[in-house]
Amino acid sequence: MKRVLISAGNAMLFVLLLNLLTGFSAYSQLQEPVKWAFKANRINDTTAELQFIASIEPTWHMYSQEVPPDGPRAMIFTIDKSKGFQLVGKVKEPKPHVEYDDMFEMNVQFFVAEAIFVQKVKIQSNKPVKITGEVEFQACDDKSCIVDTKAFSFDLAGSKTYIAPLAVAADTSSTKIADTVLVAKKDTIPVTAEANSSRSLDDGKTPLWLFFLIAFGAGLIAIITPCVFPMIPMTVSYFMKSGSNGKVQASIYGLSIIAIYTLFGTVIAVLFGAEFSNWISTHWIPNILFFLIFVIFAASFFGYFEITVPNWLVNKSVTNEDKGGTVGTLFMALTLVLVSFSCTGPIVGTILVESVGGQVLRPIIGMLGFSLAFAIPFTLFALFPQWLNKMPKSGGWLNSVKVVLGFVELAFALKFLNVPDQTYHWGILDREIYLGFWIVIFTMMGFYLLGKIKFPHDSDYPVVKSFPRLILIIATFTFVIYLIPGLWGAPLKGISGWLPPMETQDFDVTSIVRENSGGGGNESKGNIAETPNYLNTALKLPHGLKGYFDYDEALKASKALKKPVFVDFTGHGCTNCREMENRVWSDPQVLKRLRENFVLVALYVDDKVIEMPLNQWYTNKAGREVKLLGKKNTEIQIEKFGANAQPFYVVLDGDGNSMVSPHAYDLDIASYIKFLDDGLAAYNLKYGIK
């Protein structure tokens, strides 16, 4: 019987080990979504072109050299400094895709499919020249990110015409080191681009079909403004008088409106293409300009003045209406566009401001959607004139539409001011100041709808007599109530992408309570053996959790406290890491387990600034000196766990042995809780802890 029990126990142990190894290998395979090829082209006897060719797997994207410091990890080309050549300029990259990233609240530039980078070099030797170095990059898909390094080498023939100078001055051939590269090896030349920061309302991330629908909705709103709505019956009456040809002319009229606006969008697309859009979203000048434009639009909607086109242009168009036929109808459409500009101008301007920060097609698609909605009522009422009897009558409600749009424009304007404020650290719009403006703006809008505030062109329109007005009043004040807790640090997840970062909040009740109650973090639970290194840096754990940022420190604390280590391989530029923290770690059951049962260590693999103490520097297998903490963390993940994607979670004992299969990106909270519980149970079983 004893032998049978032993055999059964061995069998169970074998099955457990098999499951562990199988699960571990499933999570820890090295991913290589970007494959590199290197090619040298000789331009002439003294100049060569180095090509770095990246082939990117489908669903993956690789970030550009030009990213803001608080965004994803920038690509960096490091070329070993050596005699025999001189760099000509910096590494040139192809035109990247530019999209707004909700997590970073900024534009990010990235490449898909294939990207070819080029560096020109001047040969300064008659002998063969060898150029070596490495490229560091970050790539992501919908589930994970990897930070990787690829070494390269080029062998070039010497220049037959090169004549060495009699005296060689000190080498000044190194390219300028950008602000994003704060630490570099003494015998290397970092080749990178200046970082930039970018953020806008739309910035090209909204799909074109959705942007079309938004513009279409804006066109419908433009119809119910006082400059446009009264013109519908007047225009329809004109076509009705044209007899049997009226319906044809009405159709031409509608198509002409669409053509005029779409042509305008095409001109904008040609003048302000993709190259210009990047400047728009990254520089303070256009963002301040857009802020002022939106404020002017709002003032116009409030009725303090009107934005109109020159009278001579309107008169010229009206004169050409008398030509009759198709040409006359075309000029009628142009007259409508010009005359209604005081109401439609701010709406059209808003669409164009939103579109020039994205793809080249965006202004065209935006104007097509707007004009289609704008033209449909004129055409349909001309085709079916009996519908005119069911139209609402003109009145003070039309001006109310304009004023409400003015409040919305004013709220939008702050978003553009927020961009340079965060990028250049002006400190004008901290999160609570921004929220304060929005609370005041939408409270005033609610009181306006109640009839408590009047503007220059308002009439004594009966207050809350219409049900839609009542619904809008309720929605407005509900939104204001939703905003108010944000003044004390509520996350307001529904609009977080529109707000300044939580880090700018001066008064955060949740953080204050957590830090002063002794129960918010996990230091009081005995999860900190000694004061961690790197506390006063950009490294952090979310939700007030306490832990370490150094692998060896965490293992040492595990032995001292007799608790397993929870390792979080993460990164500043890892959007999926933030999503896991916001949606999974924030769960009370997950947070309780992390706080009470583990020694936590966050290993940032993409940090390019923090140096380890001098006595911890080492030379890696590639023969390169490792000074940076981020580089060490990357090598730990690859060499010890055979993985290079983040997020990546491991439960270890104090000797660095895995207790359970690693866990990757997975928003299933129950699965994450099981992973934590299994890791703790395996640790307790191994060390006989009950």
Image (cartoon, rainbow, N blue to C red):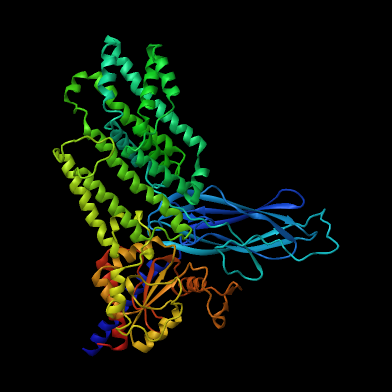
Q: Quadrant of residue 326?
A: top left
Q: How many numbered discs? A: 0
* Residue 39 position in % (x across, y down): 64, 54
Q: Could you tell me which residue is drawn at 30 percent across and 28 percent down?
A: 228
Q: Could you tell me which residue is drawn at 34 percent across and 78 percent down?
A: 659
Compared to 183, does 315 lie above or below?
A: above
Q: Quadrant of residue 520?
A: bottom left
Tell whether 49 sits left or right of 533: right
* Residue 28 position in % (x across, y down): 41, 68
Tell whether 56 sits left or right of 445: right
Compared to 272, does 564 lie above or below?
A: below
Tell whether 478 sits left or right of 235: left
Tell whether 109 sits left or right of 665: right
Q: Quadrant of residue 407?
A: top left
Q: Quadrant of the C terminus?
A: bottom left
Compared to 62, does 517 lie above or below?
A: below
* Residue 21 position in % (x across, y down): 37, 73
Task: Decide which of 590, 386 is in the foreground and name it.
Answer: 386
Q: Residue furthest right?
A: 166
Q: Could you tell me which residue is drawn at 43 percent across and 45 percent down?
A: 290
Q: Tell me if residue 111 can be seen.
A: no
Q: Tell me if residue 263 can be seen.
A: yes
Task: Decide which of 217, 167 is in the foreground and name it.
Answer: 217
* Residue 653 position in % (x across, y down): 37, 82
Q: Quadrant of the N terminus?
A: bottom left
Compared to 665, does 296 lie above or below?
A: above
